[in-house]
Image (cartoon, rainbow, N blue to C red):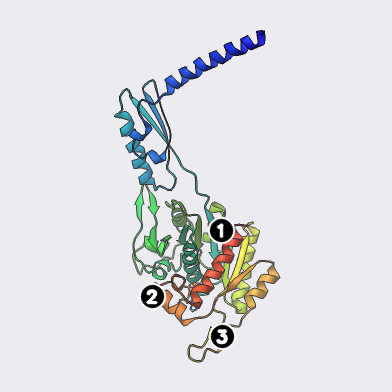
């Protein structure tokens, strides 16, 4: 009896307290009266102070700023509100950075990077591509656009092409001006590209310069890629250098997601006969020997060269070349998500 009595009193006290709390934190007006109701996660008004928490996921910096301004203005316009506090939250996109390197130049690393990025975007991924090739930034040509990125609050806004976003060191200088950047200048410029407004990009592919120099080291140390991909042609010379690139990533504890053999089989456009001007299978054998995955082989195809030079990535089209890039992109995605 005594216990039941006390229980009833305690319950009554709790009800009064929660009513008081509800009164104190009751919004002055309906949340739906504020703009962007779909983004508002909570809205409280107490003692003339409106506190709004809104979700800014996927918005660019400028969009987030206007969301904040709109909410503050609308909250201050409501009766009894003298101060408005707006806090924006954003589910940080868990962005996976993949470095694409090669031991030596001219093996098709930039072509492969562009087409893998396009293939991944066609698979529904939100993809960003950084052209960090200090000695020969070629992504604007490969993706067929000379649009320049804009900047907001000192942050670069990437350019869109073929369903992906990209930034290139080549966009930061006028056409024809070679970028013989070294050391701090190159690494500083690369940091700007990595820290750009990539908004909802889940995958960030970085087309590195060939070799194992400052830019590669700086990227590994500062941005900690989730993995690296090495592009090589089947020749021994290219493979010796590819081994060096694998070594660098191994030493820096960046998992090598795989090796891609480029310019392998050549199919004669007239008779269809397959030949192997640079040999074949070398990269696969080297991968097995180094204990790293082999991601696949791309043909030496006149169409790949011509279409790439014309700014039409073959991966954006249809046919065997596009299929070859899609197959490697599928394997890469599986390697990254495991
Ligand atoms: N599979 C391929 N078939 C035919 N041509 C190709 C293929 N891959 C690349 N190429 C051509 O080879 C040339 C070099 O390619 P790319 O610029 O991608 O190489 P890279 O390794 O990035 O070179 P660098 O690092 O020196 O800039 C380009 O003209 C490109 O179109």
Which residue, given by chain and number where applicable, does mark 1 sit on? 217
* Viewer-nearest of discs 3 and 1: 3
* Residue 167: % across, % down: 42, 60
Q: Secondary structure at mark 3?
A: loop
Q: Residues within 10 Å of mark 1 (few under 14, many from 20)?
A: some
State if disc 1 and disc 3 touch (CB < 8 Å).
Answer: no
Left/right of residue 227 with respect to residue 77 in the rendered view: right
Relative to the observer, which residue lies in front, 234 or 117? 117
Which residue, given by chain and number where applicable, does mark 2 sit on? 310
Q: First in sequence: mark 2 or mark 3?
A: 3
Q: Is residue 229 visible?
A: no
- How many numbered marks, from 0 up? 3
Q: Residues within 10 Å of mark 3 (few under 14, many from 20)?
A: few
Q: Secondary structure at mark 2?
A: loop
* Residue 181: % across, % down: 44, 62
What residue is drawn where x is 47% and y is 20%? 21
**Real-space Cα separation, disc 3 to disc 1, in angstroms:** 33 Å
Relative to the observer, which residue lies in front, 227 or 34? 34
Residue 238, placed above or below residue 250: below
* Residue 333: % across, % down: 57, 61
What residue is drawn where x is 51% and y is 92%? 271
Left/right of residue 298 with respect to residue 302 in the rendered view: right
What residue is drawn where x is 36% and y is 30%? 30
Give the residue at the far front of this rendering.
1
Which residue, given by chain and number where applicable, does mark 3 sit on? 277
State if disc 1 and disc 2 touch (CB < 8 Å).
Answer: no
Answer with the quarter of the image where residue 14 lies. Answer: top right
Q: Secondary structure at mark 1?
A: helix
Within 8 Å: ligand 1 and the Cβ of disc 2?
no
* Viewer-nearest of discs 2 and 1: 2
Quadrant for the C terminus in the image: bottom right
What residue is drawn where x is 36% and y is 45%? 63
């Amino acid at each position: 009896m005594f216990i039941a009595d006390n229980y009833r009193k305690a319950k009554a006290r709790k009800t009064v307290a929660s009513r008081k709390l509800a009164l104190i934190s009751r919004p002055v007006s309906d949340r739906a009266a504020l703009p962007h109701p779909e983004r508002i996660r909570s809205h409280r008004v107490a003692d003339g102070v409106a506190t709004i928490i809104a979700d800014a996921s996927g918005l660019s910096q400028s969009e987030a700023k206007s969301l904040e301004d709109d909410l503050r203005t609308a909250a201050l316009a409501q009766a009894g509100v003298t101060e408005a506090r707006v806090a924006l939250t954003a589910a940080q996109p868990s962005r996976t950075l993949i470095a694409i390197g090669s031991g030596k130049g001219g093996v098709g690393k930039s072509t492969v990077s562009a087409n893998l990025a396009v293939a991944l975007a066609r698979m529904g991924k939100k993809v960003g591509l950084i052209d960090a090739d200090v000695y020969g930034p070629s992504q604007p040509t490969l993706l067929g656009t000379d649009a320049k990125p804009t900047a907001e609050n000192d942050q670069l806004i990437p350019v869109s092409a073929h369903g992906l976003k990209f930034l290139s060191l080549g966009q930061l200088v006028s056409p024809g001006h070679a970028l013989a950047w070294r050391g701090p200048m190159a690494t500083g410029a690369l940091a700007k590209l990595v820290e750009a407004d990539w908004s909802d990009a889940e995958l960030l592919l970085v087309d590195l310069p060939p070799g194992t120099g400052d830019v590669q080291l700086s990227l590994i140390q500062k941005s900690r890629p989730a993995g690296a991909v090495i592009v090589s042609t089947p020749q021994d010379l290219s493979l010796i250098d590819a081994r060096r690139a694998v070594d660098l990533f191994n030493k820096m504890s960046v998992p090598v997601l795989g090796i891609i053999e480029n310019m392998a089989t050549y199919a004669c456009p007239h008779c269809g006969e397959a030949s192997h001007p640079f040999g074949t299978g070398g990269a696969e054998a080297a991968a097995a020997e180094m204990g790293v995955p082999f991601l696949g082989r791309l043909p030496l195809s006149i169409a790949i060269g011509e279409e790439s030079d014309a700014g039409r990535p073959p991966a954006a089209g249809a046919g065997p070349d596009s299929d070859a890039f899609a197959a490697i992109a599928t394997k890469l995605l599986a390697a990254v998500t495991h």
